[in-house]
Amino acid sequence: MDGSNHSRVSEFLLLGLSESPEHQRVLFWMFLSMYLVTVVGNVLIILAISFDSHLHTPMYFFLANLSFTDLFFITNTIPKMLVNLQSQNKAISYVGCLTQLYFLVSLVALDNLILATMAYDRYVAICRPLHYTMAMSPRVCISLLTLCWALSVLYGLIHTLLMTNVTFCGSRKIHYIFCEMYVLLRLACSKTQINHTVLIATGSFIFLTPFGFMVMSYVWIVRAILRIPSASSKYKAFSTCASHLAVVSLFYGTLCMVYLKPLDTYSMKDSVATVMYAVVTPMMNPFIYSLRNKDIHGALGRFFIGKSFRG
């Protein structure tokens, strides 16, 4: 077959986690429930922070943006998967697949960069408290968020544009719940060396650099907390970081389960790991941040009480 025919890809088949009708029915209700919980949880976080002036601080500003990113991220993948589970037609167009890939790559990068920015906020708050007002002023916060968005948009564009140069032949079946970078590269019949090289180079910058920054931030934070004489003050300082540490661990833990292995070793187990970072992580973040957070509890209480009185 001539190589030029390979590039005329009209669609892929998103087969998901199982092709069994019985399993698909169970998966549909499971993922629908998880999607609704994720949407409700993240929307409540955004509403609580937006409508309560007590939460108009840098930490909650970035938390609201993290919730928005998670909301956008899961909406990029799960609705299409739910439609596929209820339909005999598992097809996704070539353009639709690349669009999904672009938002997936961009939003994962954005999640990562916002988490790094939140680590910086905690570092300044605990290690440089006298400089906090100036170092985390509204102007600085907006500038940091803009930088996060710019880098993530650029990251997504680079890899999506590179993917348009890849040709496909043979099987178009994707045994994943969405159009994922490594799975598409496995289906390629053209050389993908450039894609892999750029993926490693940009991935190291976008993911490893912020991760290293977060590690160093928490090393300094722990050292600062250990120097606090009062046990109650130590607990209070650490409690402001505990939720962020839990989210970072969940994010990087699930991401490493999928991507820290050779491309040719991907299997169905990796589909399950993909569900962890693509569905479970966005669902768990609101619970982690609000479980023992009295500020969030109070804001939600005031929000609903205010709504009931106005109603």
Image: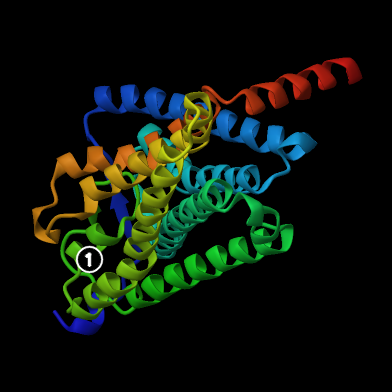
Residue 30 spot, x, y in % from top left: 38, 24
Query: Depth check: 157 or 25 in front?
Result: 157
Residue under pointer 1: 185
Query: Depth check: 111 or 210 in front?
Result: 210
Horizontally, residue 48 falls left or right of residue 27, namely right
Residue 18 spot, x, y in % from top left: 22, 34
Residue 99 spot, x, y in % from top left: 46, 62
Residue type, numbered disc 1: Leu
Furthest-front residue in this view = 229
Callout 1: helix, strand or loop? helix
State which quarter of the image contains the N terminus: bottom left
**Looking at the rendering, which quadrant does residue 203 occupy?**
bottom left
Furthest-right residue in this view = 310
Horizontally, residue 64 falls left or right of residue 138, namely left
Compared to residue 181, the image places residue 299 above or below, namely above
Compared to residue 223, the image places residue 213 above or below, namely below
Specify the color scheme. Answer: rainbow
Q: How dense is the environment of label 1, judged by Cα within 10 Å: few (below 14), some, or many (20 and up)?
A: many
Residue 227 spot, x, y in % from top left: 44, 40
Compared to residue 236, the image places residue 3 above or below, namely below
State which quarter of the image contains the C terminus: top right
Horizontally, residue 53 falls left or right of residue 136, namely right
Query: Depth check: 187 or 160 in front?
Result: 160
Report if residue 72 is visible in the image: no
Report if residue 242 is visible in the image: yes
Q: Which residue lies at the image location 28% right of the left edge and 71% below the top edge? A: 199
Query: Depth check: 300 or 87 in front?
Result: 300
**Looking at the rendering, which quadrant does residue 163 occupy?**
bottom left
Q: Which residue lies at the image location 18% right of the left edge and 78% below the top edge? A: 193
